[in-house]
Image: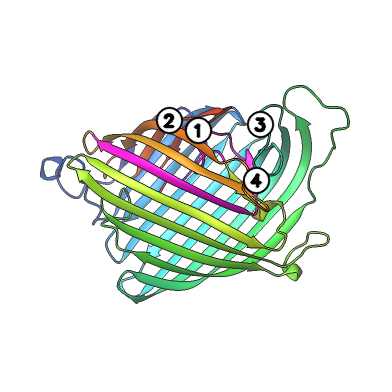
């Protein structure tokens, strides 16, 4: 669950842990009982400055189970954001999910494609909303299939150049957009756990379609997107887990700004700034070693390799990352993530919630 912040943990409190700590393995936590945590925080990043807010998590891995997070952040001036992520697994065969986001925020725009310059991006001030409900049915053990909806809205309220102004800069970059897409999704999941898995595989494939009539963009076209997400987890030594991830997508047609893919920032090619590279087709390979010092702290070292384009890939990219994962009491299942990332011409520092994958 991503949340932009750079200083964290003013206060932690939550439900009583299900088992005494001495009964747990060195990095094992009991997620079979309903557990919650709440975290007020103060933070800073280079996009929005000082931020203040809080987060709450509720999770239980056995069926019926739940994994939910609600968090909000504000710089007390011109950035305000609220996010809800909710997943519920019933005692029967149904799975319900929801992602909601509403914010007044900024987007640093470097340009389109994979050859953008690192300096002087244009900053767009926006109102941004997302609603993504999902319903899946367990066809047989480990396999689910179902439908989802994906609504996104963006209203641009201003544009400025970061750094030296450029003559002829436009006062507006993109038209306002409200687009609604629907899709089909299938999942295979035999991981030993949802939060911080140590072994098993996860596969997800989604097919999304946005008819031109469901978008407010002038001259909108129907487009279709196919996305694949493959993850594998292996314990290679008692305290060492190898996590591997492939994520890729193809687009047929011309999506608007909100449905074009982006690399850089929180999740993919993490050594580059948010929104650094953009396009209709992309792939990313991620290899990560997770060394568990104990159930509270782990050290992660990883590499991201990939590219993005509209037509053909022109410049494959590699980033390296290293950081800590700190468990949040009382159940220690949810994590705070502190990470440094390095790309060819940019670097990043992040403190977030949750693993990348």
The reply to whether callout 4 and callout 2 are in contact (CB within 8 Å) is no
Question: Quick one: which residue is furthest to the left in this view?
Answer: 23
The vertical placement of 37 against 87, above or below, is: above
Q: Is residue 177 left or right of residue 128?
A: right
Q: Which residue is mark 1?
A: 5
What is the C-alpha distance between the residues marked 3 and 4? 29 Å
Of the numbered discs 1 and 3, the one sitting upstream in the chain is 1
- Give the x, y percent position of residue 40: 43, 35
Question: Which label sits in the foreground, 4 or 1?
Answer: 4
Which disc number belongs to residue 8? 2
Residue drawn where x is 20% and y is 39% of the image: 239
**How many numbered marks are there?**
4
For the record, the magenta segment spans: 264-292
Which disc number belongs to residue 77? 3
Of the numbered discs 4 and 2, the one sitting upstream in the chain is 2
Dot 1: element: loop
Q: Which residue is mark 4?
A: 278
Dot 3: element: loop
């Amino acid at each position: 669950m991503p949340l932009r912040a750079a200083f964290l943990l003013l206060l932690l409190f939550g439900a009583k842990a299900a088992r005494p700590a001495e009964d747990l393995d060195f990095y094992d936590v009991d997620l079979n009982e309903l557990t919650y945590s709440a975290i007020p925080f103060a933070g800073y990043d280079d996009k929005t400055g000082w931020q203040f807010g809080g987060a709450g998590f509720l999770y239980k891995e056995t069926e019926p189970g739940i994994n939910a997070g609600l968090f909000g952040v504000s710089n007390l001036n011109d950035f305000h954001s609220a996010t809800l992520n909710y997943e519920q697994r019933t005692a029967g065969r149904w799975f319900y999910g929801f992602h909601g986001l509403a914010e007044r925020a900024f987007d640093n725009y470097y340009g389109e494609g994979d050859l953008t310059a690192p300096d002087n991006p244009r900053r767009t001030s926006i109102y941004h909303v997302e609603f993504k409900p999902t319903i899946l049915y367990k066809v047989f053990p480990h396999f689910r299939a179902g439908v989802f909806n994906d609504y996104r809205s963006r209203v641009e309220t201003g544009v400025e150049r970061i750094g030296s102004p450029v003559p002829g800069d436009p006062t507006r970059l993109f038209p306002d957009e409200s687009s609604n897409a629907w899709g089909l999704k299938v999942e295979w999941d035999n991981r030993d756990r949802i939060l911080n898995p140590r072994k098993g595989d996860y596969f997800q494939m989604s097919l999304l379609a946005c008819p031109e009539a469901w978008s407010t963009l002038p001259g909108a076209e129907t487009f279709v997107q196919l996305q694949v997400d493959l993850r594998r987890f292996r314990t290679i030594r008692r305290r060492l887990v190898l996590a591997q991830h492939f994520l890729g997508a193809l687009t047929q047609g011309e999506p608007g700004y909100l449905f074009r893919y982006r690399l850089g920032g929180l999740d993919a090619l993490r050594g580059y700034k948010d929104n650094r590279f953009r396009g209709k087709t992309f792939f990313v390979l991620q290899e990560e070693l997770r060394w568990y010092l104990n159930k509270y702290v782990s050290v992660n070292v990883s590499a991201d390799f990939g590219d993005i384009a509209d037509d053909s890939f022109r410049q494959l990219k590699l980033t390296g990352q290293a950081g800590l994962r700190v468990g949040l009491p009382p159940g220690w299942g949810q994590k705070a993530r502190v990470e440094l990332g390095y790309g060819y011409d940019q670097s990043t520092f992040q403190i977030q919630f949750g693993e990348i994958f």
